[in-house]
Structures are given as C-alpha cells and as structure tokens.
Image (cartoon, coloured by chain):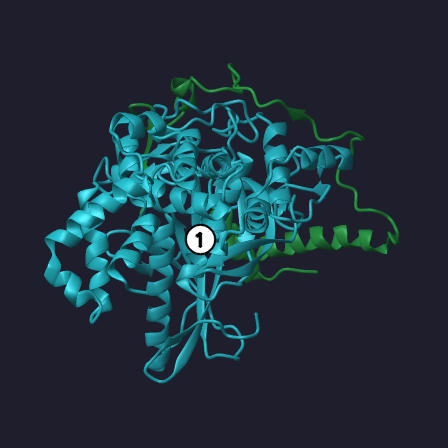
Amino acid sequence: MSVDKETVRKVAKLARLAVPEDRLEPMTNELNGILKWIEQLNEVDVDGVDPMTSTVDMKLPMREDVVQSGPTGGGQPDKVVANAPRTEDSFFVVPKVVE
Amino acid sequence: MSEPRKLLKGETGDWEVVIGLEVHAQVASKSKLFSGASAEYGAGPNENVSLVDAAMPGMLPVINKFCVEQAVKTGLGLNAKINCWSRFDRKNYFYPDLPQGYQISQYKDPIVGEGEVEVEVDGEEIRVGVERLHLEQDAGKSIHDLSPKESYVDLNRSGVALMEIVSRPDMRSADEAAAYFSKLRTILRYLGTCDGNMEEGSMRADVNVSVRRPGEPLGTRTETKNINSIRYVKQAVEYEARRQIEVLERGGKIDQETRLFNVATGETRTMRSKEDAHDYRYFPDPDLLPLELDPDWVESIKAGLPELPDAKKHRFMRDYGLSLYDAAVLSQDRAKADYFETVAGGRDGKLAANWVTTELFGALNKSGKEIAESPISAAQLGKLIDLIADDTISGRIAKDVFAIMFETGGDPERIVEERGLKQVTDTGAIEAAIDAIIAANPDQVAQVKEKPKTFGWFVGQVMKSTGGKANPQAVNEILKKKLGVE
C-alpha cells in the first residue's frame, strides 16, 4: 500500500492540518516509508487467530446510570467554557456556521 | 416486496417511490452515554456538560450500563438479532458543536442486527425490515439567531445516548413511512427505552427517498435530515417524491445529496454540502474495549419485556374479535390498551371497542385530553355498557348518559336513576303512548299501509313522547301490531 501526493493533501485537509505545498512531496515519501515498514507485518501468518482488540486482558468497564458531580458530571459551565476565546452567558461564541 | 403496491402518476407514466428511514431515538437515561452529566432537557447553557463531554484532555469515556440495556431491550422489541460482541468507532468530522472532533458511534459491528416491524396502513399490514440499531453520542447544539455574525454553542446534548435505528428501503408511500415512524415510537414507548417526545428532539428521522419506474433497479436517493414529527415525515416524502419525478421527467438527474426540510413551507432544499463531508475515516475507538454481552443477561432482559404492541394487537383480534384497525388503534398506546381491556373484561369486546374508540376517543380528542385525564374511568364506561346490555337504557340514551358522565363525572347508574332515564320496558306504558299517537293522527294511520316508509315517523313520535326512554324493540313490535303492518 502507498499514498500519492493528492491523497496526502486530502487527508491533511480533512484533519485540518495546514501542509505547505512544498512539504507535500517530502511528506508523501515519509508516509510511504512508514507504510512500507508496517507492511512487513503482512508476512506473519495469522490464519485462525482472532483480531486483537486490546493489549489488556479485561472487559469493558461499565458504570451505573447515576448523575455524577465533579469532573465527570455537570454543573460547571464556567469551567467548561474557561478556555474559550469568546463566551457569553456560558455559551461558546464562534464564527457563524450555517448550513 | 416485489409487487409494486402504490404508484404515483407522472406525466410520462407511473413511478414507484422507495423510502428508508434512519431514526435517532434518545435513550431515556438519567446520565449520558459515556459521562455522568445529566441528560435532562432544558438546563441552562453548558450546565449539563462534564469535562468528558467537553473533550478536555485526559478525560476518558466510561459506558453507561443502563443505556446498553435499553439498546438490547429495543432490539428485542424490534424482533432483531442481538450481537453479543459489538464495538465503538470514531466518526471523524469537524463542527463547532462536536468538541471531540469525532462522534463515538458503532460502524461495522453494531449492538443490534436485523429485525422486522409490523406496520398498519389503511387497514392492511406491511412488514418493514430493520437493518440495524446502534448506540452513539448526540452532538451539541448551535444556535444561529442570537447574533448576526456569530453562532452560540451549547454542549448540553453533547454525549447524550442515542439509538440509531436504520430501516430497509421497504416503504412505498408517504403514508407507509409515517406509519412506520409512528409504530417505532409506539414500540419505544411501550418498552420505555425512549420517551418519544418529538418536540424536545427525543426522536428524529432522516428520510431517504428515491423514485423508479416499476420493476426497474433503485434510483438515486436523497437524504432529508432531522425531521421531528410524523406529519413532517409524510410531507417530506410527498414533496421529495414529486420533486424527483419532475426532475427525471424533464430529463434531469437526481444528485445523491443531503437536504433540509422547511417546516413552514413543507418543502425540501439542498443543504450546502461541504466537500468530503462524507469521508468520516471511521476507526475503532482506542479508548473503549469491545462491548461484550453475557447471553444470560440478554435472556433475562428478554424475560422481563412487557407485552409488545404487535402481540397485543394480535391478541385483541383473536380474543375480542376486533378488526385490524381497531386492534391497531387500541394497542398503539399502553394506557389506551389497558383502559380498553378493563372495559372489555367480561363484556362484548367489539361493543367495548366501539365505545372506547368512537365515543371516548372522540370526546377526548375534542376536549384535548389524554386518556389518563379521562373524566370517565374504564370501570364506569364498563358499567354504562352493562346498562345497555341488560336493557336498563337504550343505546341512544346511553350516548346522553355518556355525555353527562364526560361533563360532570359520576357513576352511570346514579345518573340514570337521578335523571329518570331508565328505559320503559313496561309494555302497558308504551301501548298507552302509542294509542295516544294513533288517536291523534288518523290521516297518518290511513296512509301507513300504502306507504310503509311512514312507519318510521310513528316510531319517532313514540320515542319523542316517551323522552327517548321507550325500549325501541318493544315500540316496533307493538306499533306493527296496532297499525297492522308487517
């Protein structure tokens, strides 16, 4: 598997990364190097082996349906918007986005 | 599904409409899917937002067991396969009301697989396939009308648990789509897994519509987003089908696109589509392990399910002899079904269904009341029916008694007693009334043998003179004898 320059441009755009035009070519080469390196894994025979979904031997922990307080609960709008460049009445204020 | 059921006429021939629905139903949980913030509607801006929902660095999602249980319950209610191994994926896109930059959803391995729903349309039953149900997070809300140049973002909904229920493209008319949406709501409310409150956005539908010539392969579809009422689903399908037929008949082409529904005009319009908007680059969420369910747990949920609307509907048809229409109407809502069963217990089921669906629902509708607020209890309505059955009152008087009960409440027996509405079955009294009328109307009596139609006039007179209380059967019999007509 390999990627071309246009794919790199598209992926950068989707990830909202500003990649200057003159960096696209070198980045394509670097990414292809990484992909080629990972591709060595294809040499391993995985017939009959379940895909690994985690490196830890545990089940998904679940919580009860209880409204919490503290960082994992609500009631702290001031903290939620603390880092926002602009706020009003505890709303985030952002440039107009209309469909 | 191969026989075209309903066709739309175009200028150049018939068209078949094909509809599929994606319904988002909010899980009726207290807290969010992956955080302990409240999921309640109507709080102040960003009041119900935890640092998990705001996507602060280092915060990790922990799944709400209740939400998983509701998804399983709903799956069972849709007669669907429960997948004991499912997992969560990240759906990546950027939008101001999505602080994580991705929505946690289920892509390849949803918690619920294929199922099927029975839907009643025009007294007929159709089957709509369910492709899947998966759990996912809701996004926040952007408000555009508070400022001319800015949008305000409230993350209260961000992270609230949604069940997305995806149907097969099995619907063929706007009525079928609306009936399916309505049926889903009924099932969710029976199960209690979603409150079905559409005004608060607890249930929304994305409507996929395409048209084709009968027998042809599927046409290109459009998706109209976020429709929050049964009526709007119908309108959106009707408008979209007509629009597509017009475009195609003029030699145009349908673009696969996302559209918005305008509730004021009933029209749909193109949503300015962003380039690459659908390139979501799904991948398994590394913050979450696969969701594994114990089959015994699923079995125990199944054992605890209430009787579902379809089972109830079939039982009503079988045990009470109701028509599909009446059975469907009465099983639509658990409160209505319970009310009906109390009225019908030990009585004529069809008669009970008539009184409940026609008189009671009619009166409730007129006064804008819900069944729970009915001024007449099920036991009282049952007693009223008993009074008709044992000839204490006539069916006509029963309607008057019903109106009084609805207006002022109270026991039917007492109302009949107090107002002297008991049916006159004493043939002597009826005969006396008839004799008086015959004596007063010699011309009519002379005519009745030539014109049997005037017999009804006599019946009317007798009923009038007895205040409607005479037993109609007795009146008929005695009148026939006295007037000498057959």
Q: Residue at x 70, y 60 (%)?
A: A1
Name the quadrant of the C terminus of chain B. bottom left
Nearer to me, B347 or B292: B347
A50 to B46, vertically: above or below: below
Chain letter for mark 1, please. B
Percent coordinates x, y for residue B399 in the rendering = 30, 41
B209 to B281, vertically: above or below: below
The answer to whether one can see residue B61 in this image is: no
Q: Residue at x 68, y 37 (%)?
A: B302
B275 to B90, vertically: above or below: below
> Tag 1: residue type?
Asp
Secondary structure of the residue carrying numbered label 1: strand
Nearer to me, B85 or A12: B85
Q: Colour of chain B?
A: cyan
- Answer few, some or many: residues within 10 Å of disc 1's Cα (few below 14, many 20 plus, some between 14 and 19): many
Name the quadrant of the N terminus of chain B. bottom right
Q: Is residue B81 rendered to the left or right of residue B386?
A: right
Q: Residue at x 85, y 55 (%)?
A: A43
Nearer to me, B32 or B67: B67
Residue hosting label 1: B206
Q: Which chain is green?
A: A
Percent coordinates x, y for residue B47 in the rendering = 39, 22
List the single residue furthest toward the top: A70
Percent coordinates x, y for residue A31 in the rendering = 65, 52
Q: Is residue B453 rendered to the left or right of residue B91?
A: left
A96 to B404, vertically: above or below: below
